[in-house]
Amino acid sequence: MARYMAEQSDSDFLTDVFKIALGVFIGGLLAALAYGQIQEWQLERALAQSNAAMKREMQKVKDQEEKARRDAEQRRVQQEQQRLADEQAARDRAAQQAVQRQQEYERNARREAAWKRYYQPSALCNADPLTVPCVNAGMVARRNFDAQYRD
């Protein structure tokens, strides 16, 4: 080996050193390029993940807004239906009360008509109804009428 080195000239040695240096330089350059590509890929991946997360978040917000809008619309419709139902119930109650008042009026009219048919005061009581015997006779007749009357 020493002979090989002795036979080798300085120019061959410098060429070999230059080749090694060039190889190291190219290797370092390729390593730097690979490192840059890896960083770029990681950055793109992080950016894509960030964009995807942002899109999901925006979709979530949009879905929440849509749900809130639907819920508000549903509440509005329910309130409107409740208002209409309350108004209808009030109209029904008013109609029922009117019917009850009419029935009460008719019952009272029938009762008074039956009373007039039941009790016919004497001619003396027709002339002066405020005398004690007429008032007493009217009260007794009314008590008897009330005990017997059925509508």
Image (spheres, grey):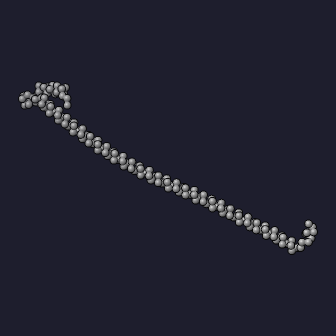
- Front one among 97 and 61: 61
For image coordinates 84% across by 70% down, the residue present is 16
Q: Which residue is at 11% across, 27% downward?
A: 134
| Residue 132 visible here | no
Q: Residue at x 76, y 66 (%)?
A: 27
**In which quadrant is the N terminus drawn?**
bottom right
Q: Quadrant of the C terminus?
A: top left
Side of 122 relative to 93 (left or right)? left
Q: On the picture, is 42 further left or further right than 12?
A: left
> Where is residue 127, by image quadrant?
top left
Residue 122 in the image, given as x and y percentages of width and height: 8, 28
Q: Residue 62 in the image: state x and y as whole percent.
A: 50, 56
Q: Residue at (81%, 68%) from the top-left corner?
A: 20
**Image position of 149 with respect to 28: above or below:** above
As drawn, the residue found furthest toward the bottom would be: 11
* The image quarter in which residue 22 lies: bottom right
Q: Is residue 10 visible?
A: yes
Image position of 33 (left or right of 80): right
Q: Work out whether residue 16 or residue 61 is closer to the camera in this orientation and state it.
A: 16
Is 64 or 9 nearer to us in this picture?
A: 9
Q: Return the x and y of residue 21 as percentages of the image width and height.
A: 80, 69
50 versus 92 height, above or below: below
Determine the image quadrant of residue 121: top left
